[in-house]
Image (spheres, coloured by chain):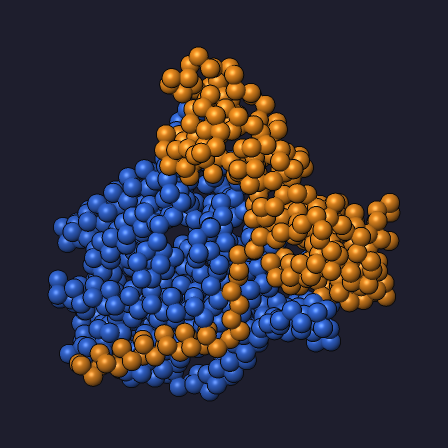
Chain colours: A orange, B blue
Amino acid sequence: MWATNLKILGVVLGTLAFYTFLANKIPQVQSEVPRALTLGADVTPEQLVQAGEQVFTGIGGCTTCHGLGTRAPNLLTDEKGQGPIGARCGKREPGKDCKSYLHESLTQPGAFVVPGYEPIMPDMSRTLSPQQIWALVAYLEAQGGTVTVTASDIPAESKLTPGASPGSSGSPGVAGGSTDPMAVLRAAGCVGCHKLGDEGAAVGPDLTHVGARLSAAGIREAILFPDAKITKGFENFAGIMPKTFGDQMTASQLEALVRFLAARK
Amino acid sequence: MANGALLLQAAVDSLPAYRDFPLIGSRAAIWIAAEIHLMFAAFVLGVPMFAVVAEAIGIFGKEQRYDRLAKEFTRLLLIAYSATAIWGAVLTFLLATLYPQFFAYLTAIFGVSMWVYVSIFFFESFTLYLYYYGWDRWKDGRAKIGHWSLGILLNVWGTLVMFIADSWLTYMMTPPRDVTPDTVPGTIKLWHAILNHTWMPINIHRLIGNVVFGGAIVGAYASYRFLAAKSDEERAHYDWMGYVGNFIAISALIVLPFAGYWLGREIYQYDQSMGITMMGGFMSWLWVIQAFLIAVLFLAGNYYLWVGMGRIPGAERFRPYTKWLLAVLVLGAIVWGTPHTMIADSRELAAMGGSHHPFLGALGVMSAKNTAVNLMILATFLSFLLYRRANIRPVVPWAQTGTRIQGAMFAIAAGVVLFYGIRGYFVEAIVRIGYSVYQVGAVLACILFVTIIDVLMGRGAQSLGAIQWGKMPPRSQYALFILAVTFTWLMGLMGFARSGIRQHWHVWQVLQDTTKYAATPALGQAAIMISVCVLIFLSLVGFIFWLGGLAEKSTFVSTTGAGKEAQHVGH
């Protein structure tokens, strides 16, 4: 029976080893987490195009459909005698220049579908940040055309994790839209009344260890609705804190600030 | 309610986001716990289904050996249930401690369903105990029907438990579109979260997959007992049991791809980019490995049948056909295994102008693959039919006509499959996708009507001799082991595909994974993890089988009984 057991073990281990070997011998591709993309005010067209190429061949997943010529239009090569995408994008949709058309194709793909193709293009603003999308537009413009995307097109939003609310970049917010929590605290005037470490005044509650007594939700509520709950000992100051921070900050700034304060245990 | 939501939100926010697990890391720990729990769960959900069917055949067909077979299956379940619960607890504790915020997020939405889940699991466990321990007590008349009803109830509980757990994982894949990163989890309606895009397709896919898996594991159990058997009678019993396990596994496997198509379509409809990631993105090569594994399953399953025909008098008539069936299977596997796109780096992509070669285009396209797999299914069904017919000669007056009609049905089905396979090359993708329905429909119709004709034709058929159960060469039993290992590995691979398409999201586009393990690993690393999980699972299953052998003697019946049935039914 031992011989049979060993044979069974051999069959099981051999089969597992073979499948593992096989799976390790084929091309290995890991799905990376998209990296934050920081494009400053002095970004050059070359930098934009380079960043856009990385998105196009990487996280954007564009090459899966664009290039075969049957599932979606070719972008880097000629498409039915009209040249690559940069050469034809300005003539695709009446009344839209190349930049607007490409941006619309990425963020509202259903708005205009090239005749002969199915509306299968996903809304890329769900997976890419505004900066990545603009970089992609620049890269596509560069395919046979002229790059017209500039730093002024790109919102100041610097946090580029996918899933960040796309609309949050529409409002400039305080501190020029920066999501550096200290910059927001200073620009919004928080340290005028709250102490934070060695900085600030002691009119309102000390924020140095605010995370130890308030949850993130509590901090969020205290910023947006300052009179909802008054910290013990500060009852006489109720009503002093402005209720306008929700309008002044962008959603990303608010969340960055909440996370920063919640971490101060 | 709003206060409750705020409290839950506060609880979620105040938790640390992640903790790490020593040595292997938190992702590997969760992966192993989830995978092994799932494998045991598939086994304990799949086996009761055919235990009940086997018991029904025993009751209504007056075949005692099926009743004993059902009891032996159920005996294996008892210890497997404990293992399922243990691994479920391991998974829950690991999730709660390693991914506390994510776990709190899920509980904020699904808390109530988790309580229901536990309650049903409680009922399920006690129904199983009643079912097994009441077997000999309620063995006659109405009591037996009552006992059989317990088996049905056991399946109902099991299915409900699975459906509830499926809602959690499908929510992670395809959360309702109105749920955004800013949605407070406590405000999401439970039923709204459960009824997400992939919930029902996964339910159905798993239901069928569990039957396949259960059949394969029972087949492996039977083959082990066959190889260890000390008498011809015992060998005959386990030979028959192995055949039943293999029959169930392969029969359900034939239907499984159709449930897979439905699931794939729902994924595409929910989010094109998710579907593209799955089929054409970084996971595209996974399907080449899957094709290889399924080819192994088809070949091993057919090989077992062909070797098994050696113990059936009269089967030599059909032996010349096996080489043609083998040719169809091998050719089909080669076509199915051809990758759609070659992996290229960014320089090569730029040079080609996309992911495909400008002249060659895509390589293995769905038209060819669907055609190949449907022809493989038809070939496997023909193998079963020949096996079934091996030791009988139909005596009904219309036998010759019936056989011709059956042959015509095979020809028509193969013709339809080939026609739409070729035509698919000349139409738009959206039209081509619809052709798979016609191909599948033709194959299913062929299977259904040919089987009906065969059953009617087999009435009163002349026997060419009883099946010589137990007279199987040992190599056939190793084919059953390969089937079990391959099914288990395939299950791990498909689990990776389903979970991996979320990429760096806990909940797709709602809750991001920000751990250092967020990147979805390449197939090589995933394969190592899958093999480790399969090895742990099979080791534990081996231990359970050994325990099962200690608890009670095997339930084989005399060869006289087995041979008697075989004269009429052929298997």
In the picture, the quarter occupied by the N terminus of chain B is top left
Q: Is residue B200 above or below residue A33?
A: above
Residue appearing at x 34%, y 40% in the figure: B114
Residue appearing at x 22%, y 53% in the figure: B82
Residue appearing at x 16%, y 51% in the figure: B133
Instruction: Report whether B241 appears left or right of B198.
Output: left
Q: Position of residue B492 (x, y in %)?
A: 40, 63
Residue appearing at x 44%, y 56% in the figure: B516
B56 and B219: which one is in front?
B219
Q: Which of the 4 quarters of the picture holds residue B343?
A: bottom right
In the picture, the quarter occupied by the C terminus of chain B is bottom left
Q: Position of residue A34 (x, y in %)?
A: 56, 55
Instruction: Report whether B405 appears left or right of B434.
Output: left
A259 and B61: which one is in front?
A259
Q: Which of the 4 quarters of the picture holds residue B26?
A: bottom left
Q: Does the rendering let one see residue B245?
A: no
Instruction: Report whether A176 appears left or right of B299.
Output: right
Q: Does the rendering let one see residue B168?
A: yes
A155 and B42: which one is in front?
A155
Q: Return the residue found at the far front.
A: A198
Q: Is residue B180 above or below residue B481?
A: above
Instruction: Report whether B156 appears left or right of B544.
Output: right
